[in-house]
Amino acid sequence: MTEAGTTVATGNRAELDDTAAGQGRFGGRRTTKLAIVGAGAVGSTLAYAALMRGAAHTVAMLDVNRSKVEAEVLDLQHGIQFMPMARVVGSDDVAVCADADVVVVTAGAKQKPGQTRLDLAEGTIGLVRSILPGLVEVAPDAIYVMVTNPVDIVTYAALKVSGLPSNQLFGSGTVLDSSRLRFLVAQHCGVAVQNVHAYIAGEHGDSEIPLWSSATVGGAPLLDWSGLAGQPPLTAQVRADIAREVVQSAYRIIAGKGATNYAVGLAGTRIIEAVLGDEHRVLPVSSLIQGAYGIDDVCLSLPSLVDRRGCSERVEVPLDEEELAGLRASADSLRSIARRFGL
């Protein structure tokens, strides 16, 4: 084990203790600290994205592989000149995460080609049980965001293990899936992706559902979209093809390059910004559902308000009968899997 909070650049314990308390080079004032657990493809890309966007003043990385986390930190430190000023530290000691404002957990079993997210559950749940108590001990007031698959089951397990309230710990859910949906709709309609508002709800996985009935393109209801000149309409078959591609795209990426990392790193950073900036942003994160849409005792994704309190409340968008049935079926599937693992 390294000395608690060793920095790659200096190894100065006093300097890191200062960082852990959120003080130091930023004028002695309280600054924002992001801790990322896991220095693999997702964790290191998320750190890079957060630094490039100036999401936090301090980014701390934790990984059991000391040489890996130190290498990632050193590489990031060498690029600080070219991004908003920040500090980057890393260690294999949980103390590096002390007093973090946000803790993002990316560590987990790696998804292999052909594996579903749910195939990863057992190993990742075991990891969560081993690391989460130590994290909560050093960062009891942090907002915890789970970004490891299967995220809904892992989030439910993490709530049980940690004892944290559901607003303080939630999962990245279908923020990335919704981004994939918006990209594909925008591509088909010939508009900017920023002009598409649509959500994926339910499981981050095979049973997820697109909420077509509340989606809009340029302010127009998506289901009424007749298409721009030269652009084909959004028929039921096109929508079904888009929904299928949203589900399958992660498998295609994993088959081609071994992991998804860029888009999930950006999606995770967007959640972090919503928390640290107290943005009151509506994002489809995975949180504990107790009563919404007749669903209880399961973690899944619904449009939710994300701010400095964490996942503070859900926004109950109207669902048609098919969407409501799909959401409840997704909840039933996730609940049965959670029970299979004794949760």
Image (cartoon, rainbow, N blue to C red):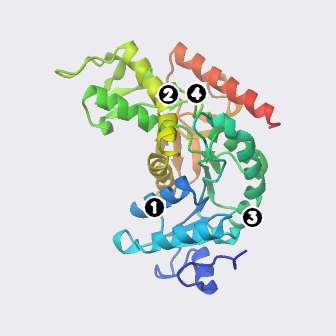
Residue indicated by mark 1: 48
Residue at point 25% right, 32% down?
A: 191
Residue type at numbered disc 2:
Val
* Of callouts 3 and 2, the N-terminal one: 3
Q: Is residue 340 left or right of residue 138?
A: right
Estimate how packed mark 1 is, as few (under 14), some (14 to 19) or many (20 or more) residues with alpha carbons within 10 Å. Answer: many
Q: CA distance from mark 3 to mark 2?
A: 37 Å
Q: Secondary structure at mark 3?
A: helix
Residue indicated by mark 3: 137
Q: CA distance from mark 1 to mark 4?
A: 29 Å
* Of callouts 1 and 4, the N-terminal one: 1
Residue indicated by mark 4: 206
Q: Residue 211, can we see it?
A: no
Quadrant where the C terminus sits is: top right
Estimate how packed mark 2 is, as few (under 14), some (14 to 19) or many (20 or more) residues with alpha carbons within 10 Å. Answer: few
Q: Residue furthest left?
A: 229
Q: CA distance from mark 2 to mark 4?
A: 22 Å
Residue at point 58% right, 46% down?
A: 311
* Of callouts 2 and 4, the N-terminal one: 4
- Residues 50 and 196: in front is 50
Estimate how packed mark 4 is, as few (under 14), some (14 to 19) or many (20 or more) residues with alpha carbons within 10 Å. Answer: some
Q: Horizontal and vertical percent for residue 133? A: 77, 58
Residue indicated by mark 2: 317
Front: mark 3 or 4: 4
Q: Horizontal and vertical percent for residue 261? A: 49, 49
Residue at point 43% right, 22% down?
A: 212
